[in-house]
Image (tube, helix red, strand yellow):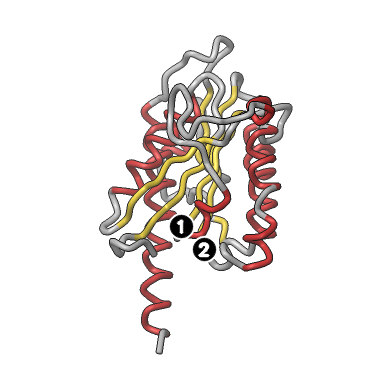
Amino acid sequence: MTRDNKIRILIVYDSNGGNTYRMAQQIGRGVESVSNCSAVLRAAPKVGDRSASRLPAVPDSGAPHAEPADLLDCDGLIMGSPTHFGNMSASLKHFLDQTTEQWFAGTLTGKPAAAFTSTGSMHGGQESTLLSMMVPLLHHGMLICGLPYSNPELMQTTRGGTPYGASHVSGEDGKAALSEAETSLCRALGSRVASIAAQLTAERRKEAP
């Protein structure tokens, strides 16, 4: 819990053309639709940037860069990446590879987690990318939250949106805006993780001596 006593949901994303960043913003709105919950957006530093002598705290656009220390304060984690050959990006994977200390400490154990992705085509590997992000989160002992079919947009969408997490089809040029269904599902994912985090926190408080 943070000092202001709010439930803090960390949203870590990698983005190339800005699509996953826009998804992260909508997911954050879903988080903050839940009472006493706060969304914290962080961008995974690009792998190629790490050779620089000094990486700026804030990139040219988007949220500040993510650091493994950000995990210490969160009550839930949502991760997003563009699809790279049916897998998460190297930059997001590199971020996760730096979290061994948090794994040893059990920092994320028992906290809710979810994933989101964007692809250029309908069959560009959305589901496999979402699953690839879930594997390290399971190793951290997190509770994976997908999107239930009680969200009618899962049946109605003609573009992105899966039970494994929020997704977006950006088109061949990567410029397609989020559809109404994709936006709704992004917000639903954020609110679901936040609601579960709030419930778990309330239970921990009851059990505390």
Q: Residues within 10 Å of mark 2 (few under 14, many from 20)?
A: many
Q: Residue at x 58, y 11 (%)?
A: 172
Dot placed on the residue nearer the N-terminal end, 1 or 2 = 1
88 left or right of 200? right
User: Relative to residue 154, is residue 31 depicted above or below?
Assistant: below
Q: Name the residue that disc number 1 marks.
A: 74
CA separation in Å, label 1 and label 2: 9 Å
Indicate the amino acid at tag 1: Cys
Taking the image as shown, residue 39 lies to the left or right of residue 15, namely: left
Q: SS of the residue at dot 1?
A: loop
Q: Residues within 10 Å of mark 1 (few under 14, many from 20)?
A: many
Quadrant of the image for the N terminus? bottom left
Q: Quadrant of the C terminus?
A: bottom left
Q: Position of residue 95 (x, y in %)?
A: 64, 42
Question: Label 2 is placed on what type of residue?
Answer: Lys
Where is mark 2, residue-wise?
A: 111
Give the label on residue 201, or none.
Answer: none
Q: Name the residue: 47% across, 57% down.
A: 76
Which residue is depicted at the point 32% across and 55% down? 37
Please provide percent x and percent y for residue 127.
64, 38
Residue contact at pointers 1 and 2, CB within 8 angstroms: yes
Location of residue 124 with respect to 174 vertically, above or below? below
The residue at the point 62 percent across, 41 percent down is 130
Q: Residue 153, position in %: x, y?
A: 42, 37
Determine the residue located farthest toward the bottom in the rendered image: 209
Residue extending farthest top: 173
